[in-house]
Amino acid sequence: MADAATLAASTPAADVVAELAAAYRRVQDVESEIEAIGEANVEAAADAYRNATRLLDRYEDSATGTGDFKAYLQFQNEFIALAEGLSDDVLAADAFQRASDRMDKRRLNESDFDYAREQIEAAAEAVDLLERREATHDEYRQARHDAKARTDELDSEADRLRRVGELGGVDLAASLDPLREPVEAYNAAVREAFDRFRRTESARELFELLAAGADRPLVDADRPPRDLADYIESAPAGEEPLSTLREYADYSPSKLDHYVDDPGALRTHVSVHQTYLNRVGPDPFLVDWPPTEAGVLRARLRELAPLVRRLDAPTETEESASEPDSDADSESIEYHRRQLARLARTDDYDRLRQVAVADTELSETEFEQLAAGTVDDDLAAVEDGLDAIETALDEYTIE
């Protein structure tokens, strides 16, 4: 049976599976080398090599020639004890013994230290084995991490391709005008009316409108900060349009004193909430493009109805109540809202919305994939890659 790396060869997971397989084999190879010698023997040889090297480096100057006799004795005792403490099974134990025998004399010189270093170099293999073991385990852990990360990437890619396949089932050549035009007409009417409302109606009425929008889940307007709303509700200045109050906030105290009863209160409440006031706009009352599902859109338009009627001019509102489809009413928000609600109750809405979603979501590359008919094949390759990674993670497991 083929291994995971072979199965993954033609998938988007080939590189990470191959690296995981290679990292696994490197671990197995070095572990086999250590096992053949004996792990305890390898570790003992590595410790002996490091300790012997430390002693040679530390005492070479002081224990040679006519140097410090005390240092010479200290070195000799420690080095001989280190060699004699190794069992015969330890890697290069005989090399340590030869070096120890050379050191067992009354006077040492540089050549003795050079000889000892040459002998114990045989034990450097143990240090190399342990360092390679650590390195290969690090590489293995990284390879597993990379394989799991590729799984996340391929999961996302599979979801994208499935979505492309779904969107590719619509008539991409269909005209979107029957849906786009009523949405744009409604939004244009809302923007115009909101701008007029913000400029001409009191800040108090505007804040009441925003608070009402915040109370409706499908509108979800940004509720005014409580302290600012309380000020607008209670202060005489709240009867002025919001644009006027924002203009007042830039006046000097002496100039502002001619316009409001409490200049300090206005500056305190209006000036500190500039970030919120900059966000106040028609967006909560607009319809997104592409619009949402038919049922959600109808429900949202119902929640918007009493709000947008307040945005319409009084005369327009009165006309829309009696003749909702009349020419005189055709520019009101309410008229366009009802037109959209009617469209959302038709079979055409779902079809057009799917085209709009596809037109908005699909990239040029995805359109090319659909045109070439490669989406299913690409998805199959991604799914094969996911299977290959799952197999590899199971197959190349180190306890």
Image (cartoon, rainbow, N blue to C red):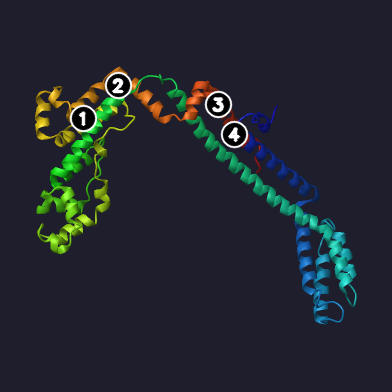
Instruction: Indicate which disc, 3 or 1, sits on the residue closer to the N terminus.
Output: 1
| Location of mark 2 (residue) | 178
Q: Report the disc number at residue 378.
A: 3
261 is higher (above) or lower (below) than 390 = below
The label nearer to you, 4 versus 2, is 2
Instruction: Indicate which disc, 4 or 1, sits on the residue closer to the N terminus.
Output: 1
Q: CA distance from mark 2 to mark 3?
A: 34 Å
Instruction: Indicate which disc, 2 or 1, sits on the residue closer to the N terminus.
Output: 2
In the image, taking residue 20 as reference, residue 207 lies left or right, namely left
Quadrant housing the C terminus: top right
Q: What amino acid type is highlighted by mark number 1?
A: Arg
Element under disc 2: helix
| Location of mark 1 (residue) | 302
178 is higher (above) or lower (below) than 128 = above
Q: CA distance from mark 4 to mark 2?
A: 48 Å
| Location of mark 4 (residue) | 390
Q: Position of residue 320 (x, y in %)?
A: 12, 27
